[in-house]
Image (cartoon, helix red, strand yellow):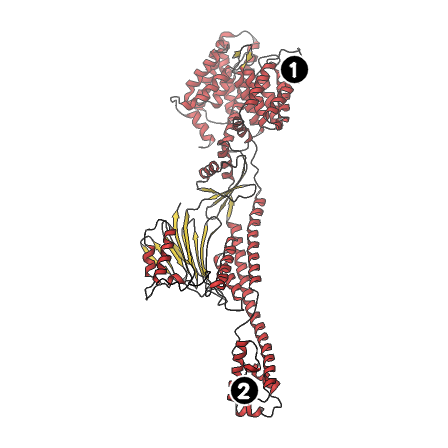
Amino acid sequence: MTQPDIKDKINAENLRAPLLRDGWRTGILLLVSRASVLGMFPFGTAFFAACFDKSIAYVGIASMAVGLMTCGGRSAVVKYLVAALVYWIYSRVRKKDGDIYNAAACAASMLIGGIMYLIYNYQGFYDILMLLVESAVSGLMYIIFRKSEEFVTSRRSGMKAPQDELISVAVSVGVLITGLSGIVFPPNISLADILSVYAVLCIAYHTSLTSAGSGGLSIGFLTSMSSPSAIVTMGIFGISAICANILKGFGRFGAALGFMVGCSIAFLYVGGSFELPVSVIEVALGASFFALTPRRVHNIIGSFFNRTIQLESLSPDVRVKEYLTMRLEKTADAFKSLEECFEEVSEKRLKSYGKEVGALLDETADRVCDGCPNAAKCWQKDFGLTYKNIMLLLTTIEEKGILAMDNVPASFREKCIRTELFVVEFNHVYELYKKQFVRVGEACESRDLVTRQYREIAELMDEMAGNITEGFDFRERAEEDIANGLCKNDITAYEVNVVEDGQGKYEVFLRVNKPSEKALIARVLEEVLDAQMAYDEEGSGAYMRFYSKAKFSVDVAIRQTCRDFSEVSGDGADSFSAGDYKRYIIISDGMGSGSRAMAESRMTLRLLREFLTSGFGVRTAIDMINSALCLKLDDESFSTIDLLSVDLMTGICEFFKIGSAESVIMHGANVETIFSVSLPAGIAGGINVEGQVKKLADGDVILMMSDGISEAGYGAARTDWLKKEIQKPFDEMDEMAQSVMDTAVKKSRGSVLDDMTVAAVRLIEN
């Protein structure tokens, strides 16, 4: 309900029975009804008109009567009760609503009540003059009480309060304290004077220098307005409040000391010229009570006043700059990983050459056979035998790397009279041919790889542009609500930034005075944002970071066994999170087994982790890794990639299978198999990176494996045992993974013929 709605309800609701929550307004009305100025009591009527619930108007009028009867205002009770009654009638029939109209109505009600009083007690023109003054004061106090109520409302909504509201609060507090006049402790110590000192110190300690001075002047005047020395007291309290504010850097004891020093100087200056309503003892008691007030109480008071300070919120351009900086830093990290990858695999040797050797034979014949008397016989009459012998030499040089005399077949040595020269020239021409072939092949392959990588980078930049233009929004209204909610829980927020992405997920960055209260802060965020929030334990520098809690989590267990007589496994497996809502499980099987296969699979896993955690998509990451492996041409180098991507907000799982073994899924009562659709990475320049999407639910299970597991057993239906295994009721995924491994070894008759890796994954709804 908005504030105007509340005000209309208070003023227009039918009469009802009083409730317990009405007690505090009734008590305040009783106290302000007792406050007087120059023998007049206009404050009760003004508070009744401005802040009291008209649906229990009879309670308010009775409270005013009690207040007036206990403070020497018996003779004028009828005047003020009539004024309150007239305003209540006005509130029931009024056509226009607004503070100016209502203040005028309050003044008019006081005037009507005063006229009725003067009918029986008129003594002269002075009475008329004082009635006009009292009516004006009543209308003015209506405005002040309304602004004080708005101040309290602004604390609840988290809005910045203007300075005039704070001054209105100081005046209202002064009137309230004046209502305590008459409560005196021996030896003549006034409770009202002690509380006035305490109130001024609270304002001086928890607000600015300007507010401290204004508050001191206001409370000083109002608490002594029935005394001729009210102006002097106002000045003393104002100067003392400023001194307290100046020394508040030394804590509440420093503020109390500053106030007493200011009062002491003023008392010495005034001397005995005036009879001051506040004594040195009362000042000392008020300051002492303030200094000894527990820190927790001061935190509550401070949180109330500090809400007049607007949150330090970053401007939109600064926010966008910080967000873009974060994204670009992640992109830079990804390209650094790519650089390391190319440094590792930059040894470019070519093992396989083209089958067209005509140019090689022609060049060798021109160098060796020109001028030989047997040239015509070898290349014309016995061409078939010559070609066969040279192909044997080509096979030998490809296997040995170089041709030597002891490697030349006897049939060739018997036929060629220039055997030694032929061996020398054949080695030379073959080396030139090999270098040319490698240069051309590498140029073509590198050109294709760079082209693909440019395309991948362009796609990444397009994705970033989409995220920037449509992917996030700053929720300023939520920031105010969060600051207000924290304030109610005794936590002061210095800065709040709420970011919402296109999928409705939140990120909240905070600076607060109590960063240890993580659970309490998370609870406030959940109430405001209507979303489950989690705290980022890694932190964000000077800020606390909370983010929308994922709907799902995953239980992952991985088991590995290397093949018999091998010290290390050629399979690699990894499980990690990227961001707050993505979980990846990867199995990579290097070619063969042993340390060489292990190095290939480990490199694939490491690059995948770096790419994915740096913000690259799965397709881009796999394409880049494939490009890197294709450049390692000193030997065949490839790895399978079995990658599972789990969206922890939606439960959508995507399978990317690059030459890998099948996976088995249990979705409810159904069991299905996911097969590979592409060659392993590193074989071909372009591979099919298409994900297979499945929507899973709470409790669904996935089995991922290398071919050592999937090929365990004999017969055409050798993987049927995996479907039965996944349907067993295992409490933990560790148990399932171990059971699958044990069964696979058993199916292989106790022999591990290939490296075995299995990952058991269960989706769990939080």
| Relative depth, front residue between 389 and 609 | 389
- Image x and y of residue 566, in percent: 45, 63
Does residue 431 show up? yes
| Left or right placement of residue 625 versus residue 664 in this view | right
- Asked whether the viewer can see residue 356, the reply is no
Look at discs 1 and 2 and give the one toward the viewer. 2
Pick out the residue farthest to the front: 565
Q: Which residue is mark 2?
A: 412
* Residue placed most toward the observer, 101 or 719: 719
Taking the spot 54% from the left edge, 21% from the top edge, the residue there is 173
Badge 1 is on which residue?
Answer: 267
Question: Residue 572's x, y, as percent?
Answer: 46, 58
Looking at the image, tell me whether mark 1 or mark 2 is earlier in sequence order: 1
Name the quadrant of the N terminus: top left
Give residue 723's position: percent from left, percent from top: 33, 58
Location of the C terminus (image quadrant)? top left
Instruction: Between residue 718 and residue 256, name the one nearer to us.
Output: 718
Q: CA distance from mark 1 to mark 2?
A: 128 Å
